[in-house]
Amino acid sequence: MKLLQGTAQITSSGHLEIGGVSATELAARYGTPLYIMDEAFIRKNCRAWQQAVGNHGKVAYASKAFCTLAMCRLVDQEGLSLDVVSGGELATALAANFPAERIYFNGNNKSLEEIELAVRSNVGRVIVDNFYELEMLEQTAARFKRPVSILLRICPGVEAHTHEYVQTGQLDSKFGFTLDNGQAMSAVKVALTKPHLYLRGMQCHIGSQIFALDGFAAAGKTMISFLADIKKATGVILSELDMGGGLGIKYLPEDNPAQVKDLVQTVVRSVQMACATNNFPVPQLVFEPGRSIVGPPGWVIYRVGARKEIPGIRTYVAVDGGMADNPRPALYGSRYSALVANKANAALEETVTIAGKCCESGDILIKDITLPRLEPGDILAIPSAGAYQFSMASNYNRLCRPAVVFVRDGEAHVVVERESMADLFRHDLIPKAWEKQQERLRVAR
Ligand code: LLP
């Protein structure tokens, strides 16, 4: 079964087409590996989130999933807010003219430079993660004479059912102020004494690639009862509750993630019920979806190369990318599906393992997948590749990071150019002092 979502389809000649553009043609035009983003599908996902959240609150796209100038511009065009987690993401958003007041600045160890950039550019909300940051932000806001609106990142002690590395809400977590041991309440009290910081509300994020909605409901309930406790302890009624991101997506045809509207409804209901129980006014909600907006619309295509058959054991087929452009299988054991873009309707003939080209045995993109017979030059296409692939890509083995194209209505636009070999050592230097030494060596020889 093939995973075709958004505008992706297989033509009668068996070619994969995304946004009305043939993937094989894109490979010929722009080279491989190549990230292809289905623009209409990204916009559709933005709108689905906006529509589901409606007047319950706001949607802030989590740019860590995929952050480029064009993506920030698209998010602005669609009217969403933006969640950034570093000076680099913030600078990208600002360079794309993204309105600073719609930016949420997350992160557990913001540097002074990052905090200064946030304060100077008047970002809408800084989500304060710890006491160190709280002090640094107050001092910076005072120095620039700019009041800053903040949320506090709370660790609600809720375990999401997902991979351990992408769980964040559990008690033993590096993120946020812990609720259970009173640290979160202390943070609220400290924050309320800061003259340049306006405490607007709380934030939590329980994890990523989550299918079961009960964790979100539990987090909503816990957070409302905390807001009610804050009211009791300080008399202050906070009106914003940011629930983070985390909605899972379909990587394999058999995956069955929840719909955006079901997640939002689940949270809204649990929040409303908890508010009624605690006699607390329903706050404005914020959602920070990343993967569910850009994951399904993204594809990555590779050119097939070498094959190694180990009779009775396994056949490896290697492609011209791997863990450098997609570290997720090696890092989290993530599983993917694939199809052959230039012969998508051909009969499934063999079970192979798709290997990358990095010098590591662990550089396997897909273990045991049944596909048509793969020949050198075939184009292998992996769906649901839009989130945390380009943004986590590296130059390991000095591989050039691939280009990114947006496709829509039969047109393709490069939004990130492929790196060149020269880019790889653009920032390298040879110590000046070695020049003399080299001269001496030459003379000596
Ligand atoms: N908000 C906060 C505070 C977050 O930490 C994250 C993700 C999000 C929102 C967006 O979550 P999403 O809707 O995309 O699940 N690299 C991993 C995922 C790490 C997620 C980190 N935080 C992966 O490739 O699966």
Image (tube, helix red, strand yellow):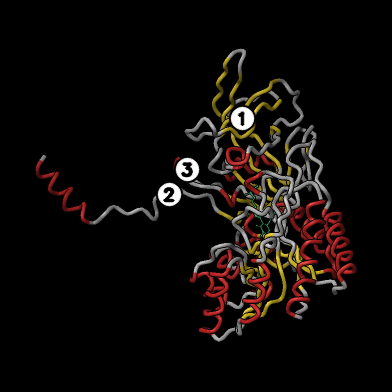
Classify mark 3: helix, strand or loop. Answer: helix
Residue picked out by circle 3: 396
User: Which amino acid does the dot numbered 1 rest on?
Assistant: Ile
Give the secondary structure at mark 2.
helix
State the residue at coordinates (61%, 83%).
147
Disc 1 target residue:
354
Question: Could you say whether the residue bearing mark 1 is in a helix, strand or loop?
Answer: strand
- Percent position of residue 236, x then y: 75, 80
Relative to residue 326, is residue 160 drawn left or right?
right
What residue is shown with label 2?
424
- In the image, what residue type sits under mark 2? Leu
Which is more N-terminal, label 1 or label 3? 1
Q: Is residue 411 visible?
A: no
Q: Nearer the viewer, mark 3 or mark 2?
A: 3
Is 204 located above or below residue 301 in the figure?
below
- C-alpha gap between disc 1 and disc 2: 26 Å
Q: Is residue 94 above or below residue 40?
A: below
Crowding near the residue tagged with mark 3, few <14, some 14–19, many ≥20 C-alpha atoms within 10 Å: some
Q: CA distance from mark 3 to mark 1?
A: 18 Å
